[in-house]
Image: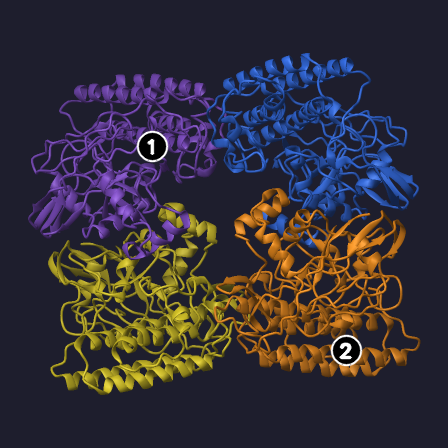
Chain colours: A orange, B yellow, C purple, D blue
Amino acid sequence: MRVSKPHGSLERNAALRALYQSVRAASGRLGAPLSDADATVQSMPDASPAKWHLAHTTWFFERMVLEPHLPGYRVFDAQFNFLFNSYYESIGARQPRPRRGMITRPSLETIHAYREHVDGAMARLLHDDLAPAVAELIELGCNHEQQHQELLLTDILHLFAQNPLRPAYKDPGPIAVGDTDSAPPAYRRFDGGVAEIGHGGAGFAFDCEGPRHRALIEPYQLADRLVTNAEWLEFMADGGYRNPLLWLSAGWTTAQSEGWTAPLYWEERTDGFWSMTLRGAQPIDPAAPVTHVSYFEADAFATWAQRRLPTEVEWEHAALGEPLRGNFVDSGRLRPAPAQAGRAGLRQMYGDVWEWTRSAFAPYPRFKPAEGAVGEYTGKFMCGQFVLRGGSCVTPMSHIRPAYRNFFPPDARWQFSGLRLAGDA
Amino acid sequence: MRVSKPHGSLERNAALRALYQSVRAASGRLGAPLSDADATVQSMPDASPAKWHLAHTTWFFERMVLEPHLPGYRVFDAQFNFLFNSYYESIGARQPRPRRGMITRPSLETIHAYREHVDGAMARLLHDDLAPAVAELIELGCNHEQQHQELLLTDILHLFAQNPLRPAYKDPGPIAVGDTDSAPPAYRRFDGGVAEIGHGGAGFAFDCEGPRHRALIEPYQLADRLVTNAEWLEFMADGGYRNPLLWLSAGWTTAQSEGWTAPLYWEERTDGFWSMTLRGAQPIDPAAPVTHVSYFEADAFATWAQRRLPTEVEWEHAALGEPLRGNFVDSGRLRPAPAQAGRAGLRQMYGDVWEWTRSAFAPYPRFKPAEGAVGEYTGKFMCGQFVLRGGSCVTPMSHIRPAYRNFFPPDARWQFSGLRLAGDA
Amino acid sequence: MRVSKPHGSLERNAALRALYQSVRAASGRLGAPLSDADATVQSMPDASPAKWHLAHTTWFFERMVLEPHLPGYRVFDAQFNFLFNSYYESIGARQPRPRRGMITRPSLETIHAYREHVDGAMARLLHDDLAPAVAELIELGCNHEQQHQELLLTDILHLFAQNPLRPAYKDPGPIAVGDTDSAPPAYRRFDGGVAEIGHGGAGFAFDCEGPRHRALIEPYQLADRLVTNAEWLEFMADGGYRNPLLWLSAGWTTAQSEGWTAPLYWEERTDGFWSMTLRGAQPIDPAAPVTHVSYFEADAFATWAQRRLPTEVEWEHAALGEPLRGNFVDSGRLRPAPAQAGRAGLRQMYGDVWEWTRSAFAPYPRFKPAEGAVGEYTGKFMCGQFVLRGGSCVTPMSHIRPAYRNFFPPDARWQFSGLRLAGDA
Amino acid sequence: MRVSKPHGSLERNAALRALYQSVRAASGRLGAPLSDADATVQSMPDASPAKWHLAHTTWFFERMVLEPHLPGYRVFDAQFNFLFNSYYESIGARQPRPRRGMITRPSLETIHAYREHVDGAMARLLHDDLAPAVAELIELGCNHEQQHQELLLTDILHLFAQNPLRPAYKDPGPIAVGDTDSAPPAYRRFDGGVAEIGHGGAGFAFDCEGPRHRALIEPYQLADRLVTNAEWLEFMADGGYRNPLLWLSAGWTTAQSEGWTAPLYWEERTDGFWSMTLRGAQPIDPAAPVTHVSYFEADAFATWAQRRLPTEVEWEHAALGEPLRGNFVDSGRLRPAPAQAGRAGLRQMYGDVWEWTRSAFAPYPRFKPAEGAVGEYTGKFMCGQFVLRGGSCVTPMSHIRPAYRNFFPPDARWQFSGLRLAGDA
């Protein structure tokens, strides 16, 4: 992993302490609205219980940092190594992923005690001077926990959407619907050439974001905003979900077998389409970006629109001209595109929805996984997934950067994923 | 349903009130050791969450009794009709059974409030004179709730058995293991002839227990006690789970595909076999009756022992000579056969484990399902199931009677089911 | 097995020779219209290729009769023991049932050579005096082959029904449709009492048909003819496939998941319903008995008609008064009920469709499976199946008898199965 | 599609006629050893019956060429449009892919008549001057048929491998096993830079092979020969199939659930490993290239060997220096690497096994699918597949070219697929 390198170790320790504390506190706030039952149930094999997210991120610090690096550290509960290991084969046996929701005990309260136990030990560790490798692991652990913060909200929305009562995670009142910006998107043109891509500078990044390397780009254009719900409704009205010629073959098969006729969480009521959100069921806002669409749907939409999805190289190249300023309002709220654009004329690059690219998740040239258990972090998932770029309304703002590579299988749609159109220039 | 008919309506009301209160209080006690999470999770499609059991039994009174028969009754929450209807097609749509575990809200606390709301209304109803049909429905509701009390414990054991921590529902201390009674069972002989079978007298019974009718019996013999764990270990040691010639064809297929090598919940440790129980993991007691075996296993064991399972007619005919006195110690505790036998020389007829019979669950001659929604109570399940007789250590004692017909599919083994051998005479 | 016992061994041998030759020749005739490909493909796991039926029945004689009882017998091909063993666990490993259709070689021609090889050896064996046990095995083998003759036609119909070209097994011309007998069935009344049931006299029977035993019968009535297609169309028009209250719970689940809206093989065309038959697609004949319905459908129909299915005891008791005279026209042709009734006033008892009874397939009192490999013949299937009585238009006429117990799972409908209504008297 | 452009139309027609005739004759030869049953059975949903391959390629000419372009053409059988359409949504409904094996009729003989009928009509069409678009379609049809020639052999091997008799498609005698070349592969070094990739010149290519475009390459090295069976046995002996750290996450899951312990078709006998081949079961030749391995296995092997798979750009860049000269001996025969290398020092580039690359199958920059129905040819499969390069021992030699992009899902292994190692330089 590539981590930030402040000048002195004192500064570094202070920065790490601050990072650690803020990340851990944020997780605590996310868990606060949840009951023990909310935090325990697993709504599908791909999702995890909130309790599991809270415990697994804690286990990561315990297992990767405290056990090897804090002398005298006392493990909170030896059985948690089995319960809260996610997928680290090198660490050993673990609760099967689809059975994570069976763990009604330990309770949420016990998990909070576990978090406090580990936080206390981490405070002791962070008090002293840290070897660079340990500091790196801690920074990785913080970024890891931020990923799980987004997953926690993503999974809770899925769980609550299974409940016919459509409970709200927070603030169940109606969201003010913005004015519909009926103007079509503008397309920004980018020249071709050899660009530098991938994380290379200061600051943390996951191993898959590097090495920084050159890439050849042909001239292309990129929409200045995301595809909206209004545009998606047009696609639906034009038979988008019924015309196999718009779809990838695997996408059509999936759409048929799953009975897709709209994005996930949409339901038609007498007064139009509603969608399940973290604030409960809400009417669709036509001007807001469409979300909870799969790669298959995004690709079919782009074909229908006689455009295409961008590659991840195109996206990152365009984003480099943009300030890291997003729409990050709060968890689970999507707003229309703001009038003001960034330097390159683009809007909504960060903080609304993850944007599907047409790039399969693959290693960059000369990529090497990290050494040790964390070497299982990303490399072993480089198959059958597509890269998403940007960051969503449930991504922690400090977790976003232009080189960030998120990835999901093409049929996944419970994450906050949307799309921006591109074309050849 | 056939219900008890005390002489006067005052007496009847008082008896009903007492029955209602004691049954409802018992459910409350069963739910007490459970956390919100424990009560919410569904461990498999055949099991239901404890919260669902507590709510569904309450809904039964609300929907079948209070709504039609208590003027001015205010429904606690109109959405509960969808959430807590089990399988009544005539009542309408409902939460799909395999998705009962998604309902994290309402919370367990709200369900308790629901129970109190209904109990209050029921107290008002029970205060006045009741039409016989209403009294019948209430008695049915109480018996229905007793069934769910057993299911609640059965399902909680299954849930806790999925947890690698093997939590105890109650009293996790070790159970004193009795002396092994190494004596083989004695076989009691019964003459053939025409017997009267089925519920016919006073007292409540489910519709499937009648009509009382004549049945022709050939001379037979019945073991005076249940098959023990020690005997089951012999079966295992003799290759019982590896010899297809002992098994029904469908049983062998199931045993192979499920990888059965011992009863459900058994696990081999360095010091022998242990089993998951409501008191947590416990060493196997050789003298206690074997439990959590399927019909397929019970039948294979009987073939191995060169005996057979009794028919339900044989069981009931033998039981009629027995006092309704059982082993009912407390929930989830199995004890060796007592020395003292009943009138017919039989032991362990009630309150240990449900005893598989070789009789498919089928309508008695001239059986007619009850009128109305409760007509869906048993008749529609008369296919693909086998009858079990007796009653188990988690059956409420007052719920047991000689004519009682429990039923499960032949591959089910999460219920407290064992066996008693029989033979031709 | 109970076999016929002619007076002398010479007579017995001659009778056996004649039986053997006629049964084997009949199989040859059934296979004649089939191409190598027709005879090889398996259309579903429950069905078997025609080639397999022709080979397996031959293997039965080779393995059970010739190998142990004809000195010097040379096995045709040692690998056939693996390929053509059906389910005899005591004989060893075998081609998995769902993979029987992978065996493109040996060819149909080789299978015919196999049959001739075995027939030659059997002729030598049948030439000499036979031990009674060997004669019994041969008679069993002939009856076994007759069962497979029916299965061959049943399975070929299923295979051809998968082909959009709807090929005919034979005689593709239209079947003359009879006049509709619009008269409702008459119900014949039978007194209750103790009846003798089960095979007991001379002649062959499978082990499950005995022992002959007494059974107690309550007074009942039985329709004098089978349910017709016209009546089934009424059931459909009245929403029979849409009303869950008519169905067993497992039946409704199956009907929904399988999308049943009519009997198997029915398809609606612009000019009404057609059905796939052994003569290709044909318009439904309203007066002919309905066939290719499952137990679930038959039971739902009976509920809708406010009747019930008979028990197998009731059916056999009624049939005993009837001459063994059926409708046996030829393979795959169903005709309206004839005007002339049998002694007890019943029509269509044999040779039209197998009649579902409400009796689960279970052992008769004191039933013991046969010794040796043939002990796996029926006993191990006594679970999850319902008994059908009578015999169908594809059953060899000499294979029918009043005590015959056919059995299928309640969701099976590719066999020629229909129903006759019954009621309490 | 990009097609060859000879100078004059006469020449072009003559060349097309020759191509058509040679391709069609080759298919006929491939079908010759098959019985009607061999040609009809479908061994898994991904495979197709040989009869289907022979008919579908013929249907392609009939539907795409003759119907629109030969006035007065009489369709052979209108129902074949349903039976033999593969996946052209724009053409309409078709036999579901997993049910292709149900079509026992039309017979293989009828399919041969169909082929002759179409060949006759094609001869008439090819006699006259052809519009360029029609000539293009015919050239596409010929290349399409060559693809199916390889698939026919690939699928027949899979079918015969399901048969316990292990029949040979041809020449069942033993294959002479070559001397083991125990020398490790040499690695050839290639400089980085901007290379031109993709089909661009004369001659036919599928649409996905273009447009020709520039690609940036970092310096790399490539093994001069394929990975051998001997090397694969080392991998197995070193626990390659038991160590999750070597595998992609999805690969490990697949390997576990499918029980992979060796390449497809390998079976361990007392004298070592054997493999099913088109010549029947044969002992493994240590010096021959390993085949029938999935992408998952190839990738795990490369990780174990501390190398990686090449990208498709690297492969094509290296191959451009090579003469198009391969190992093409005959169908289904794999030989050790020849001593003589090509210009760039590489051996076994064509005609042994398809070589897995680490490149996901994706559109080249500015890719546009062809117009019309043939636009469904490759574009809609650009998801979830990996590119393979080279060509195998069952690929028609004239079908091979450096730019050719074959593709399969990462778990597929019934095709003739192996690997060549690469590394960074």
Q: Name the spot of residue B4 as percent of width and height, x first.
A: 17, 76
Tag on residue C151? 1
Q: Write the residue at 41% across / 82% down.
A: B112
Q: Chain of mark 1?
A: C
Dot 2 surroundings within 10 Å: few (below 14), some, or many (20 or more)? many
Tag on residue D20? none
Residue A62 placement, left or right of B172: right
The quadrant where residue C124 appears = top left
- Residue wearing tag 2: A20
Relative vertical location of residue D349 with respect to residue D13 in this rendering, above or below: below
Q: Name the spot of residue A251 as percent of width and height, x first.
A: 61, 48
Residue B266 placement, left or right of A363: left
Circles 1 and 2 on the same subunit: no
Q: Name the spot of residue C338 as percent of width and height, x first.
A: 14, 31
Q: Is residue B345 visible?
A: yes
Three-letter amino acid code at the position of disc 2: Tyr
The quadrant where residue C137 appears = top left
Q: Name the spot of residue C33 as percent of width and height, x first.
A: 37, 20
Front-most of residues A93 and B181: A93
Relative vertical location of residue D212 with respect to residue A206 in this rendering, above or below: above
